Image: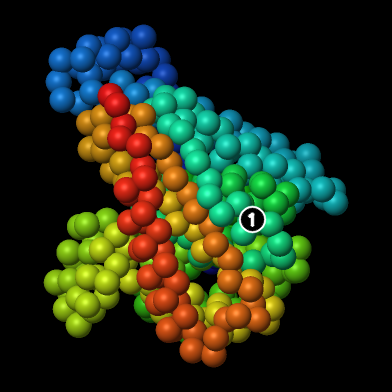
Amino acid sequence: MNISTFKTFQRRLVSISVLGLLTLIFVPLSPLLTPAVFVISKVTRYTSLIHALLFFYGYLFFEFMGVLALTNNWFVDRKKKNFLIKTRNIQNWWSYGLLKLGKSIYNLEFQVFGEESISGPSAILMPRHTSLGDTVLPIIFFGQKRKEGLRYILKRELLMFPCLDIAGNRLPNLFIDRSGQDTSRELNSIVTLLENTPDGESLLIYPEGTRSSQSKQDSIRRKNPTINSLLERWPSLLPPRTGGPLTLLETNKGKDIVFMAHLGFEGSANLEDLINGSWLNQTILMHFWRVPFAQIPEDKETFLYQQWDVMQDLLNRMQDDQPTSSQ
């Protein structure tokens, strides 16, 4: 067993053990915990605490069943031609299940604009990123809609979630190290992933590199005052990281670029938002737009910044159009 395999085994041993421990602790407590939390949500400002608990139980179910399905998939199908197809089907089941769960529990509504941009050739997809929960949106509203594979470039920290770890590494995705210890190696891995992505599959990267929030904007402003002008230019976004996105744009040999703006997942960014009622009855708005490969200019950084201007403008307009939630 080499070092990489050992680290993978060690990581999954910990993450799956934590998942099992949480299941063993919280499932037997549900008959007592659920009514108690229901009462608390009625008498305190944490009006959606009961919703968060129900979503937590649902997440445990989908994560636990996903691990079992992926394990069975490995033992039964790994030598069959449809092995990766079945793995992708499990990933789709998991992501759609979590989205449907959140939609039902928090009474969410989803509206999609620019659907014509979803059709067409495979592309490099560059969405906004505000919450761990919004990572399922591209799978469902882009990948599944097109009935094609979608290769993700994600931060390595997400490997702490067993289903993302197992399915994500089994399928052709890339989990990158953002520490900066070996940036050239990570950028080369991005180039390799793009070069190995066939015409019939799309690839996704989050240009912001992490979830956008006011606290992260403030942190960037303190650490790097030289980009204050960019933060003022895009008050709802983080400035796009130039490493990964520009590497893709500069080495891209023919794929269109599709951008995805969305509004409404800000209320699921942290635990406080999930329990204080701010995410109840939300309308999630999504807007796609496509830039054909032939229209991508030579100056890729200026192009990316111009599209981020479009992203901010769309968010402003969606904010004006978004229905007010009624709790």
Q: Secondary structure at mark 1?
A: helix
Q: In this view, which residue lies farthest toward the bottom? A: 298
Q: How many numbered tags mark residues here?
A: 1
Q: For the point 59% across and 45% down, which residue is it?
A: 140
Nearest to the observer: residue 80 or residue 211: 211
Q: Nearer the viewer, residue 286 or 246?
A: 286
Task: Locate residue 37 relative to residue 176 in the image: left or right.
Answer: left
Q: Position of residue 109 (x, y in %)?
A: 46, 33
Task: Please provide percent x and percent y for residue 216.
Answer: 24, 61
- Taking 92 as reference, is 247 above or below it? below
Viewer-nearest residue: 215 or 25: 215
Looking at the image, can residue 198 be seen?
yes
Please rate how many residues cluster around mark 1, counting C-alpha atoms within 10 Å: few if below 14, some from 14 to 19, many from 20: few
- The residue at the point 26 percent across, 38 percent down is 273
Q: Which quadrant: the C terminus?
A: top left
Task: Provide residue 290's location: percent of width, then percent of height.
Answer: 58, 66
Q: Kindly identify which residue carries mark 1.
A: 116
Q: Residue at x 15, y 25 (%)?
A: 45
Residue 271, quarter of picture:
top left
Q: Does the image show residue 60?
A: no
Q: Which quadrant of the figure contains the N terminus?
A: bottom right
Observer-nearest of 125 and 101: 125
Q: Quadrant of residue 157?
A: bottom left
Residue type (three-letter) at the residue carrying disc 1: Glu
Q: Is residue 271 left or right of residue 71?
A: left
The percent coordinates of residue 161 (x first, y second) are 46, 46
